[in-house]
Image (cartoon, rainbow, N blue to C red):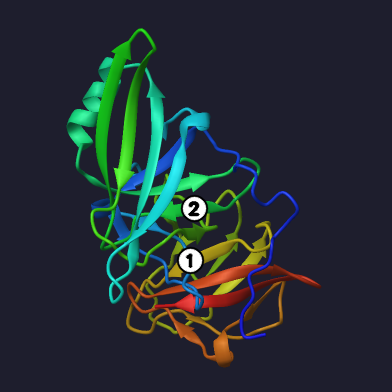
Amino acid sequence: MKFQLQKKSSNAGLPSKKRGNVRAVLNRDIKTWPPISADGTTYEGNFEFYESDDLGEIYLTASTQALTGEPGGNPDGMGSKNKFVGEHPGTSREAMAFIKKYANEGFILFIGGCGSTEYKVIGSQCDPVKLSPSIKDDKDGNITTLTFEQEQLNDDYVMYYYGNLPTTAPYAVTGSSFAATKENGQVYQLAANADGDSIAVTSSDLDADTIITLIGGGGTDPLVLSNSTAGAVGYLTKNGSAWTGLSGSRINLKVVKADKTYLVEASRS
């Protein structure tokens, strides 16, 4: 068959379980966007923000959260606009301060399910979701409703993300070797190098399918990551092509567990 879309599971149509806290970042605070997978649905890599505290959390009552994408346009310009709505309990001073500061700002939202490392991402680099709030304090309730919606029709739809949402700066690597661990995180800033030394990951306790990002440190003869199955951790790059850690360059590696841990290239830039 050229294509098929089958039911994923017997209860695929049940409402998704929601987390109360939605992760959010202002579009302008994203320093690096990860590459997108070949099928156009998944970010393959890790988001990087300008500052370690750029990521925020917004509490929205789980049962009130609604993610929609309504189609529109003409026959030669069909698309949709992503929209996410949720109710924040109360009309507190803190809530009013938030909406005064961020109303009509462009956000990227990371909406995660319970018991899953998967995030649904709405908003894109060119079409973030804009915040428009409303408040109600009457006999039926005391609620601040937050609506995040794209302004233009587009073909973004919902994207998926399994990477890191950073709350700290990238781990600074000294020398050419380091351990890729949960404690150190998923983004590694390599050091400048003058001898073309080989990168060596000495150990890893990261879970399978975790993606780590190496950021090149440059130098007169930068560090190099080459195909290798020797050592405690192996590396498999696309087409066996070595990656050179030029200043600001990036390579994204997926953790694969087999006879040992392998880091397999997902993308580079």
Q: Is the residue 109 above or below the residue 141 in the image?
A: below
In the rendered image, the quadrant that contains the C terminus is bottom left
Foreground residue, 7 or 175? 7
Q: Nearer the viewer, mark 2 or mark 1?
A: 2
Kind of residue sitting beneath label 2: Lys
Kind of residue sitting beneath label 1: Gly
Question: Is residue 173 visible from the viewing direction of this image?
Answer: no
Res. 89 image quadrant: top left
**Residue to which mark 2 is pinned:** 120
Foreground residue, 191 or 117? 117
Question: Is residue 147 visible from the viewing direction of this image?
Answer: yes
Q: Is the residue 66 above or below the residue 260 in the image?
A: above
Tally of numbered tags = 2
The residue that appears at 48% across and 46% down in the rendered structure is 111
Disc 2 to disc 1, C-alpha distance: 15 Å
The residue that appears at 58% across and 73% down in the rendered structure is 200
Q: Position of residue 82 (x, y in %)?
A: 36, 53
**Residue to which mark 1 is pinned:** 45
Q: Position of residue 170 (x, y in %)?
A: 42, 56
Q: Is residue 80 left or right of residue 183?
A: left
Foreground residue, 9 or 119? 9
Marks 2 & 1, CB-CB < 8 Å contact: no
The residue that appears at 36% across and 47% down in the rendered structure is 83
What SS does tag 2 mark? Answer: strand
Sequence-wise, which precedes: disc 2 or disc 1?
Answer: 1
> Mark 1: few, some, or many residues within 10 Å (few <14, many ≥20)?
many
